[in-house]
Image: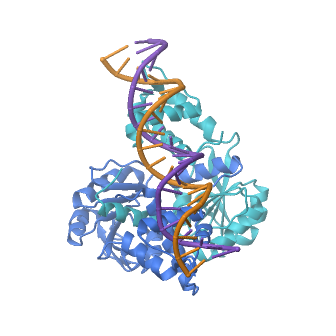
Chain colours: A blue, B cyan, C orange, D purple
Amino acid sequence: MTTPERVIERISLYRRLLNTLKGEGRVAIFSHQLAQLASGTAAQVRRDMMTIGVTGSPAHGYRVQDLIEAIGGYLDSVQPENVALVGIGNLGRAIMAFFQGRRPNLSIVAAFDVDPEKVGRVIHGCRCHPLEDLERVIRERDIRVGVVAVPAAVAQDVADRLARGGVRGIVNLAPVRLNVPPGVYTTYLDITMSIEKAAYFARQGAAQ
Amino acid sequence: MTTPERVIERISLYRRLLNTLKGEGRVAIFSHQLAQLASGTAAQVRRDMMTIGVTGSPAHGYRVQDLIEAIGGYLDSVQPENVALVGIGNLGRAIMAFFQGRRPNLSIVAAFDVDPEKVGRVIHGCRCHPLEDLERVIRERDIRVGVVAVPAAVAQDVADRLARGGVRGIVNLAPVRLNVPPGVYTTYLDITMSIEKAAYFARQGAAQ
DNA sequence: GCCTGTGAAGCTATTCACAGCT
DNA sequence: AGCTGTGAATAGCTTCACAGGC
């Protein structure tokens, strides 16, 4: 019953692609077309559609609007998800700018930093708190997802605080592994690893 | 003979963990210990060791130094790899700061931006060029890996330029899919997707 | 006893291929 | 004719389990 990580990733990607298509006025799409946009296969797209419970027609394929709604129903929680961002350096600001009023169902509602310079300000529509307040604010605002964008040396401490505050999902951008209590999901966005990977496959003459 | 992406990712992770261990004075490690640090299994670590051609001993496990060297021999090219960064916004600067004199075998040697304000300056030890010079500089400096950290709207254009310049590996941080000619490897670092994934699994009561 | 190295087994994910529909 | 939905087949990855060695 638990959907594999890979499938969730693809579904999230489909949604973004579909939103773009919708913006272009596209009404329907065939599996092989969506597959091409997502760098996948038609069969895989159809399997994923089964997973989220959407059904298409041989005549027109899948209705774009249906897909977007079904993906929303599958991926999103009923009430919008509150996200905390820890670390308001360049990376943190990039993420805030990026999320600025984007997703209706997912918004960064609180940011944290140790720098007294930043605390108290509102950056990209989001209030900045001192790190000491993390657990309290997380609880008050019912935040269950945290993004860790702090230097490696303090990432584990931040993760501990997030977990204590009740966060159940962490996105870690710091180049360290985190130790989290059971029940807390962690995913890593590792720039060094990605570049090393790209360098390796660049040399191998491509894969994908 | 081509190593799967998953394995390359783990090997890159092992190296980082091992470098930390080495810094702590650790000399040898058993597969189950490395597995714990990497959130994997002992059997998997041993398989990966086979892949890179390292052999351990039942008595002491694997020698940390051996592993680091073997991974270097496996992942790295003989001469250091030159990387180009396109987009010197918050995200680009975060990446530059992060790479600042880090990896011996992988360095960002050129950055590009359209902002005339940034062009000509040297940020984090790296010269900033105007976007128009991209293809020329890429060729001159024999750059084969590019990092795309520009807004979504111009990411495809940047990818086209990189590919024309001869880049064979691209790390894309913009939230769009790129169309690249065959032979160019592309990998995506998608913050939105990661947060959506974390939110989904946070709700499911964790995996991993 | 506890480790590594590895063939074999097991499992998961992807793709095939085709019936059914329009 | 060309699509979807899906059981069956395949491919790919991970884990088991054990021989061999300190």
Q: Position of residue A82 (x, y in %)?
A: 31, 72
Q: Give the total number of marks visible in the rendering.
A: 0
- Looking at the image, which residue is at 24% across and 65% down? A133
Location of residue A77 (image quadrant)? bottom left
Residue at image coords 74%, 59%: B138
Q: Where is the N terminus of chain A found, in terms of image quarters?
A: bottom left
Q: Quadrant of the C terminus of chain A?
A: bottom right
Q: Is residue A105 left or right of residue A15?
A: left
**In the rendered image, the vertical position of residue B90 relative to residue A61, given as above or below:** above
Where is residue D2 shown, x and y percent of the image?
66, 73
A133 versus A105 height, above or below: above
Residue A83 visible to the viewer: yes
In the figure, residue B137 lies in which quadrant? bottom right
Q: Quadrant of residue D18?
A: top left
Q: Nearer the viewer, residue B2 or B19?
A: B2
Q: Is residue A142 left or right of residue D14?
A: left
Instruction: Let me know if residue B25 appears in the view.
Output: no
- Whole-percent x and y of residue B6? 53, 47
Residue B37 drawn at (x, y percent): 39, 40
Foreground: B50 or A84?
B50
Q: Residue furthest bottom?
A: A25
